[in-house]
Amino acid sequence: MSIFFRIEPKFRPYISLQSDYVLSAIYHTRNLLKKLSREQEQSVNVNLVDNFRTIIVGNSTATLSGIGAMFHKLLDEIKERRKALLMGIDLEGLVTYPDILVDEPDNITPGFYFGDIPQNHLRHYDQTLAKLIFGHQEMSRKYGMVTSDGKLVLNHPSCYRFLEEVALIRSALGTLLHICTSGPYRGTEYASTCIRNTADGNPRNVKVIFGRLCLVSGYSKTSSIVSSSQFHLINATNKYWQSQQLKVNYRFIPKCAWLTCIIDFAVFRPFENVLAHALRLEGAKDRFLSRLFPGLTSPISSGDISAALQRDTLKFLGSGIGLRGWRHVTVGFSRAHKDPGILQVRQIDPDNQIRGHNNDTSDSNYAINPEDPVGVGFDKIRSHLQTAHWWFHLICK
Amino acid sequence: MILFSIGLALKQFPHYSRPIEDTQRSAAIKLLGVLHDNTGTGREKQQSALQHFLLTLFTQNKRNSSRYTFTIFRFLVLYSFRIEGCLAKSGTITQYISKIVFFGRAAIFKEIQKLMTKKKQGYFSYVI
């Protein structure tokens, strides 16, 4: 069910594209600027050399094998930094997850995420970090102390530094997921990724689909809805807005990165949330549980993500490449190595023709199941899964 | 944007004087008047004055003249210049625009909401 909020005729000219009011002029200017921006983007000089295995974008160079090596080095780095933070305790030896992860993709309960499902056995890690830290002699002295009457008094500066370090490690995790999932994110799309359903009814972006950990995101270009005479109150249900404007993307995470992600979701976040409450980090408290990139003092922006990507690509590839540059890199490699076996999203489906409806009607009304949200199409999700496999194989072979 | 508009309304920029609509000027003066009101209802008054001021800015009609008659458009043009004197990149200006559009839509949406509350209509009156 879509919910529309009709606009009083009197107000329509104020927000419509064709009118004599301010927003109309602003929309036209924005569209013009976007065209200019695209031309500026297109003018980037891209060269594919070395049998299409090296790409030169402007002054930056990236190789396919370099990206693969970067992925593994980042995994190791995250592991080592977590270990150093916890004074030698290796969480990867302590945390396990079941061979088969399950999810309830249609569960729209605020605050829900796949780790809350008992079969996934992740809830019992909620207090793991607190027990580890305050059960460790040296760490418990560093981060707080237990008074004679049994109360825990935290050492605030140390705890804040702990949160800062975790945020830095998480930014490396952000880079890791960005480079290993096929189809690079746009900055705003990535920055707003949620692990849990939000209180205002937005579904989470981290899900288990086909038993695989996946980042699901809908990206809508606002320029395409400015002329609309209706406000679309989308995401009121877990059914994605069936529209040509909203592009739903499925970025499947490679299995070798699952444990790193699960440690972040199930072990670090509950403890960070407790610390944020104790340190009275107003506003940040709930972000630790819900946002993929919560940020300490303010929510992470696309600029922050781009800066982290530049930092890590400079470190591991020798050239600092930001979000925009990375799109050139992946698009260049994808074009050169396009896998002919990738499933194409069907154009004309004879089955649907015989039934007397089009593909969209089929996808929206019939045989809907949790892994096939309304308006997306089963084939599309499968093709995204195949693309994810292909990309990971390409960079890691 | 609000500071610029208030400054323009109160003729605070000696080297940049452009006409501003009377409704905007009176709304700016009203907003300034309640800005330091620390009484119990002061916050409500401030919100209402700010909403009214934003509405006057975003419902300005150019009346067959150029887009540069819009107060907000003037702000956008000036804000798009970098300190070195050249214009910012188009991608940067679109980011400014997104923020302006957000505030504009929010102000108009709030007004619609107010009207619907007055008419005793809820969000779900138009569920399709």
Image: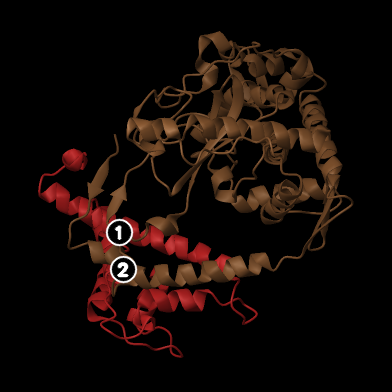
- The hue of chain B in the figure is red
Against A276, residue A323 (above or below) is below
Q: What is the tally of numbered marks visible in this picture?
A: 2
In the image, what residue occupies the spot 62% across and 14% down? A125
Q: Is residue A250 above or below residue A13?
A: above
Residue at left offset 45%, top offset 35%: A349
Q: Amino acid at mark 2?
A: Phe
Q: Is residue A294 left or right of residue A72?
A: left
Of all residues, the one furthest to the right in this rendering is A50
The Cα atoms of the two marked residues, 1 and 2, are separated by: 8 Å
Q: Give the letter of the chain under mark 1.
A: B
Closer to us: B104 or A29: A29
At a point 46% along the width and 40% down the height, the residue shown is: A348
Which chain is the one coloured brown? A
Q: Residue A260 or A36: which is nearer the viewer?
A: A36
- A272 vs A51, left or right, is left
Colour style of the rendered protein structure: by chain
- From the top left corner, tell me how far across and down residue A282 is, in percent: 49, 39
* Residue B13 figure quarter: bottom left
Q: Earlier in the sequence, mark 1 or mark 2?
A: 2
Question: Which residue does the numbered mark 2 point to in the structure image?
Answer: B58
Q: Helix, strand or loop at disc 2?
A: helix
Q: What chain is tagged by disc 2?
A: B
Front residue of A330/B83: it is A330
Labels 1 & 2 near each other (Cβ < 8 A): yes
Q: Position of residue B29 (x, y in %)?
A: 27, 74
Label ID, residue B107: 1
